[in-house]
Image: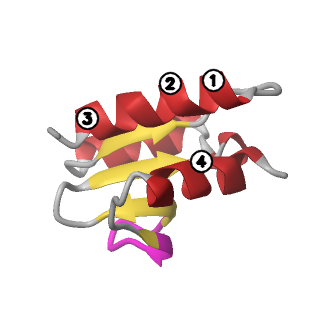
Amino acid sequence: MRKLDSVILELEARGLKFRLQTSLRVGYVADILFKKERTIVLDTRNADPFVVGKLGAAGYRVFVIPEGKLDEDQIRAFCDEVEKGLGR
């Protein structure tokens, strides 16, 4: 299973509401978007530093899924970070 899929499943299990593969006004696609909170999760392959900086400058909080293989505990820890970033 891809890391992005694992993150999506974990966020869904927590009952969080988000959109997938959403086009943004700034010309990029968010892998996961929490619209109300203006928070984005990007897969590693989409996380060019220029893109991350541009999204941040546009007012989005950006989380990038870490590179390399992640085990279940690391996926949960990443999702904990995202959930904290949402102010929950």
Which label belongs to residue 17? Answer: none
Q: Is residue 53 visible?
A: no
Displayed quadrant of residue 24: bottom left
Between 51 and 68, the one nearer to me in the picture: 68
Displayed quadrant of residue 63: top left
Residue 30 vs residue 8: left or right?
left
Between 28 and 67, the one nearer to me in the picture: 67
**Are circles 1 and 2 on residues that touch, CB within 8 Å?**
yes
Q: Earlier in the sequence, mark 4 or mark 1?
A: 4
> What whole-number distance in Å separates the C-alpha atoms at marks 1 and 2?
6 Å
Q: Earlier in the sequence, mark 3 or mark 2?
A: 2
- The residue that disc 1 covers is 73
Q: What residue do we see at 61% from left, 32% from top?
A: 75
Q: Residues in magenta? A: 20-28
Taking 7 as reference, is 13 above or below it? below
Q: Tell me, yes or no, whether the highlighted magenta stretch contains residue 22.
A: yes
SS at circle 3? helix
- Residue type (three-letter) at the residue carrying disc 4: Val
Circle nearer the viewer, 3 or 1: 1
- Residue type (three-letter) at the residue carrying disc 2: Ala
Q: What residue do we see at 37% from left, 37% from top?
A: 82
- The residue that disc 2 covers is 77
SS at circle 4? helix
Q: Earlier in the sequence, mark 2 or mark 4?
A: 4
> What whole-number distance in Å separates the C-alpha atoms at marks 4 and 1?
11 Å
